[in-house]
Structures are given as structure tokens and as C-alpha cells.
Amino acid sequence: MARRSPLITVMAAAADKAARALIRDFNEVEHLQVSRKGPNDFVSAADLRSERTLREELARARPNFGFLLEEGGEIVGKVDGSRWIVDPLDGTLNFLHSVPHFCISIAAEENGELIAGIVFDPLRDETFWAERGQGAYVNSRRLRVAARDKLADCLIGHGRAADDSPEARVRFLAQQDHVLAHTRDVRRMGSAALDLAYVAAGRLDGFWEEGLSPWDTAAGVVLIREAGGYVTGLDGRDIELDRGDILAANPHLHGALHKVLAGH
């Protein structure tokens, strides 16, 4: 059985505590679809509650760490270079529509290097976790990226950038059409963090998206690297979380997928 380090244990415990309220709130969303107030404010409150719990639990365990939070922004820690990167609810639109595909994502960073990450799917009770140099796991099972080496056999995940300009829509549709023409099929499931965990688990063969934030991708990057995968920007260069685009696959497929996306 895989042994979790103290760092991973802290992250998993914080995610588990925050998830209890998310599960309760998720079960209430369906009843709000016809309410006068509507569900948007309710989901925003659920997001904030989750983030508050995560911040409190993580700060209690590592009081010197800073934070990069989806809702709360950046909080400088007492130890320079050490921080948590937190998404308290990735897949908000799914949550809003009672679609059971969302997660909590937490990564630990030291001096600009990602050292650990977890993606917790509370509805399926799956904790995807990885620490630099220690491998990747889901619960207690070791993860490896899929071994497929032909794009024509592959299932590729992707997401849509928040940019809704005509140019962005044209580029998005062109990317989707071109990848679809070269693969078995594509999936757009609405949670980048969980999709990246699925690449690490071999459930998806690859993933790409533009317009992401560091909290969407940080934990997934650690998972895929530790599962034997390759992660870059869409241009094939080293991943930069602040740049917002990502391309992930196993080492056999990454170059081919990059070539298919090139020019779009």
C-alpha cells in the first residue's frame, strides 16, 4: 500500500474536510434551479466556503506557507517561495447544473517548483495524489499514463477558454475539429484539474486547453509528470502556469498531438 508523506496527508485531510460541505451543497443545487434567487449566488457561496476551509486547514498545518487562491488571490507567506495553489471547486458550471464531475485541487510549490499535488473527486471518493520523485496514485493504486502510441486510437480531453471573442471561438472549433479528425474521439467534461488527473490515470490519452489559471493546472502537472507523462504549453515549450495554456500526453503521443494542434 502506498504511504503518504506528511505533506500529502495534510493536503488530503484539508480537501476531505472542505468536500463535506461541497457534497451537502451539491445535493441542494437541484432544488435551487427553480427558486427565485437562483443557484448562482448559492454556488459562489459554496466555492467561498470550500476555500475558507482549505485555507484554515492548510494554514494550521503549515503556518509559514503563502497561498495562491482562486477567490482570495495571492497571500504572501512567512517563508519566501513556499505556497499552496488552491482551487476550491474546479468544475463550477457542472456543479451549478448538478453534473457530478467536479473536484478540489491543491498543489504545493517551493521556490517556483511544484513539489506535490492532489485532485480530490468527492463524489467518487477518489484522491489523485503525487509528490515529486515519489510517483502518482489514486487512493492507494499506482498510476501510469496510457501506453497508446497512435493518435487514431486515442481519447483526448480538452476545454474551452473563458475568452468568448469571435476569434477565440473560431480557434477553439478549429482545434477541436482538427484533433477529432486525427483521434478516436474527444471529450469536454468541464473540469481541467480532474481531466489532467484522468490523463495521469490513463483514462484520457491527452488533454489541451487555453485560458487556464495556475490553480486549474498546478496539481495536474505534478500528477502527470509523476505518472510518466509529458506536460508543456501548446507551443511545445516548458509549461508556465501563468501563461494559461497546457498540452499533456504520454511521451509517445505528445509530439504528434502538438503537431496536430500547431497552427490553430
Image (cartoon, rainbow, N blue to C red):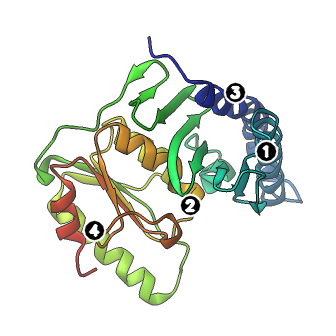
The CA distance from mark 4 to mark 2 is 18 Å
In this view, the residue in front, 47 or 64, is 64
Relative image position of residue 173 (x, y in whole percent): 34, 75
Upstream in the sequence, badge 4 or badge 2? 2
- The N terminus, quarter of image: top left
Upstream in the sequence, badge 1 or badge 2? 1
The CA distance from mark 1 to mark 2 is 17 Å
Upstream in the sequence, badge 2 or badge 3? 3
Q: Is residue 150 left or right of residue 231?
A: left
Residue type at mark 1? Arg
Q: Which residue is mark 2?
A: 214
The CA distance from mark 4 to mark 1 is 34 Å
Residue type at mark 2? Pro
Q: Which residue is mark 3?
A: 13
The CA distance from mark 3 to mark 1 is 12 Å
Q: Which residue is mark 1?
A: 55
